[in-house]
Amino acid sequence: MAEPRPVLEMTGIVKEFPGVRALSGVDFRLFPGEIHALMGENGAGKSTLIKVLTGVYALDDGTITLDGQPVQIDSPLQAQQAGISTVYQEVNLCPNLSVAENIFIGREPTRFGRIQWNRMRKEAAELVDRLGLDIDVTAPLSSYPLAVQQLVAIVRSVGTGDSDGEGSGTKVLVLDEPTSSLDRDEVLELFRLMRQLRDEGVAILFVSHFLDQIYEICDRMTVLRNGGLVGEHMVSELDQVGLIELMIGKALDQLEGLHEHQLHSDVGETLVKADSLGRTGGIAPFDLEIKKGEVVGLAGLLGSGRTELARLLFGADQPDSGKLTIGGKQVSMSAPNDAIGAGVAFCSENRKTEGLVPDLTVRENIILALQAARGWTRPIPVSQRDELVAKYIKALDIRPANPEARVGQLSGGNQQKVLLARWLITQPKMLILDEPTRGIDVGAKAEIQKLVVSLSEEGMAVLYIAAELEEVLRLSHTIGVLRDRRLVARLTNGPEITTSKILETIASGEHQ
Amino acid sequence: MSTTTKTPTAPESRTPAPSRAATLLGDRRLPVLVTAGLFLAMYVAGLSRYQNYGFGEPQVFMNLFIDNGYLLVAAVGVTFVILSGGIDLSVGSVIGFTTMFTAWLVERQGLPILVVIPMALAVGAFGGFLMGYVIHNFEIQPFIVTLAGLFLFRGLCLVISKESISIGDPSVSSMAGAQVNLGAGFLSIGAIVALVVLAGAFYVLHYTRFGRRVYAVGGNEQSALLMGLPQGGTKIAVYTISGFCSALAGLLFTLYIQSGDPLHATGMELDAIAAVVIGGTLLTGGSGYVIGTLFGVLVLGLIKSIIQFEGTLSSWWTKIATGVLLCAFILIQRAMTTRKKA
């Protein structure tokens, strides 16, 4: 695989933000025809490095050479013209335009300035066909699910510079967390496409939090930590434990400790009780009991009704059948505010759109729910507020530990922690966590899981939703299994419960 | 994912083809069709109610273009802006300013109208360019910037003169009175210009890279940037076009009314925006057709005509009917977008 000359070489890259040195002298190289993983915890500088490479950020120091030629990249357009294309985690296409337009926009085939629609559709169809995809290029992009949109984004980047028949102009394809919201089949399809492009000589830079995926598809990896380079390794020469140790910079003991964690048994009286609570089109009526100090995990496939169940308990959606009792009192929740009043907190899975306010500071985001619970007429005294914020920043190890930092500039894992802090500060009786560990790295994941454990030990009831069954299994006293928007089973965790047992239950859909 | 794989890896169910009704509801052309249908229905209703008063004469239909040509031109400019996700509130003031500017140059300075026309257009386009430049380079909401433009141009009217200036120049009068005979009826120069502008806008929006960039920026500005599109230039160009169209609309308005007045076209930006929205263009940008704007203008014009034919109704009913329509169309848009998300 090691060819004599890398297609891309970045040397001594430095990038500073006000108060943060995001990259300090990072070297990175990429060879043609390889899939290269960029690894590191949240905040290690992966996203920053990619944004420097793709011209979103200007670099403060260092050089980038492409095919041996030094290049200066000041804008995404320049990056594209130089042959560097990027597909981001959030699909950055225009959903209001057709697939063909999304592939070609900015370089539509024209004659005398007139767009040749037929030629464009034909070329788009050929391109899609060559890559082995079955997509109707005349349909609007918004008519396809996210996974397909992502594939379209890749097709677009591959086709860049291709419109005049000069061969593939893309030398470097950057995939930033493309798999975080895809299911297994979709990931396989993506991998098939990636391998095809690799075999055509494209250098692919792949970022993912799923270690298994890295080991499945990548040839080589570069590890970053705290904005610095840790090392470059062949994937075949570094095992997962070694990689994680490189990423977090310490031995795995702490993480291992969690694996052997015994579920504490001091579960108290019933806190929340749902009696045939249900909502048409959301989730079929279900019974569920959550006790004080108990962690109830929800297992099920994406779209099986996990989030819908949680939203009912939080009053974000209105049930149309059944009743809900919290602390012995029947409650009718017409809005999340009622749930907050009853001591229920909800960390949404969409931390960007439904949770955090990116333009506010860490302090303001943390204090938001507490202030809302007190009412806007009774501001929290400044000293008390600063003390609380400092306490939670420390307790959750939010980095940077600066209450005045804007949340939008934090990494995903730290944003998640800010969201958690917001709800913990209100000292809820029950905490609903919807995919709290999605899109964040191993270290932060373990910290959040440990936090869940210690919260439940303090008597808080937790409803925990996660896509990874191991995670649910490790943390939960009781596991609710969902399938097709129905709660099909409630399993009491014990030695006989394994992930394959849960999978069986999901697959068979049978009540235990 | 099985739907996107050619190799049949798993015989899973393909996504079922959506029903015809769902396809229709999801179609971006639907709002335009609804507006066109509404226009037709109103026209037929007018025919049956006022057939004895000459509503059916072709010239009544032609007059819709003659009486609303300036509004159509302004609305076409606004369509560009709204498609890009912005808004332009300066339109009415620019129209008013252009009438004053033109009347003043022709009557008080004695310049020939053919010299004044390019000057007026240049001033309008430059005003639009400035607003676009400020919106893009300082990242300020278009609402505020064009609101400033609204006050600025209205104020400039009064700098020229506090009184209205009527135009007696014979070349202007002959231009205003010129009729292009189409057999069944005639169109004014203003109406012809408006139709040419409409056709040009359609071509630009659908057959040039610039036009597609307008849609892309309106669909998702951040994406447009990351896709390497020059979204800044696109935004500035869109406001320049709107300024140009406003000035052109101002010239047509001057021809139509043959005077300049500091209070001409007050609030006309709102008529233009209403026409664009009734024509099915989403206020959030990225979706809509300039043909819809034509129907939006025609519907507004037809309401005016019908109220004239009715004879007893106050002209304020035009505003009331516009308000009701606008509300209804925004609700339709809302229903369509929520359905799309589901």
Image (cartoon, helix red, strand yellow):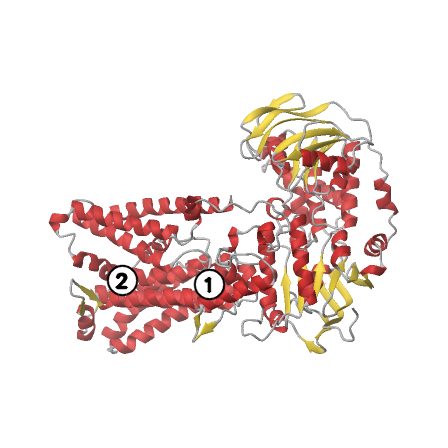
Q: Is residue A27 visible?
A: yes
Q: Few, some or many C-alpha atoms within 10 Å of disc 2 (few <14, some 14-19, many ≥20)?
A: many
- Label 2 marks a residue whose chain is B
* Amino acid beneath label 1: Val
A145 and B180: which is toward the camera: A145
Closer to the camera in the image, A436 or A401: A436
Up the image or down, A232 lies above or below A412; here it is: below
Residue B106 point in image, percent of width and height? 24, 74
Q: Is residue B137 visible?
A: no
In which chain is the residue bearing label 1? Answer: B
Picture coordinates of residue A506, whole percent (x, y): 68, 36
Locate residue A247: give its quadrant. bottom right
The residue at the point 65 percent across, 43 percent down is A349
Relative height, residue A441 to residue A127 (above, below): above
Residue at the (38%, 67%) spot, across then down: B203
Crowdedness near tag 1: few (<14), some (14–19) or many (≥20) residues, C-alpha within 10 Å: many
Residue A404 rendering spot, x and y as whole percentages: 69, 52
Q: Name the spot of residue B281 as percent of width and height, x first.
A: 40, 54
Q: Earlier in the sequence, mark 1 or mark 2?
A: 2
Please state if A505 lies on the left or on the right of A151 as rendered: right
Pick the quarter of the image with the C terminus of chain A: top right
In terms of secondary structure, where does tag 1 sit? helix
Q: Please give the residue where the numbered disc 1 appears in the rendered image.
A: B214
Residue at image location 74% in from the left, 66% down from the top: A34
Residue farthest along the left direction in this orientation: B52
Q: Which residue corresponds to mark 2?
A: B69
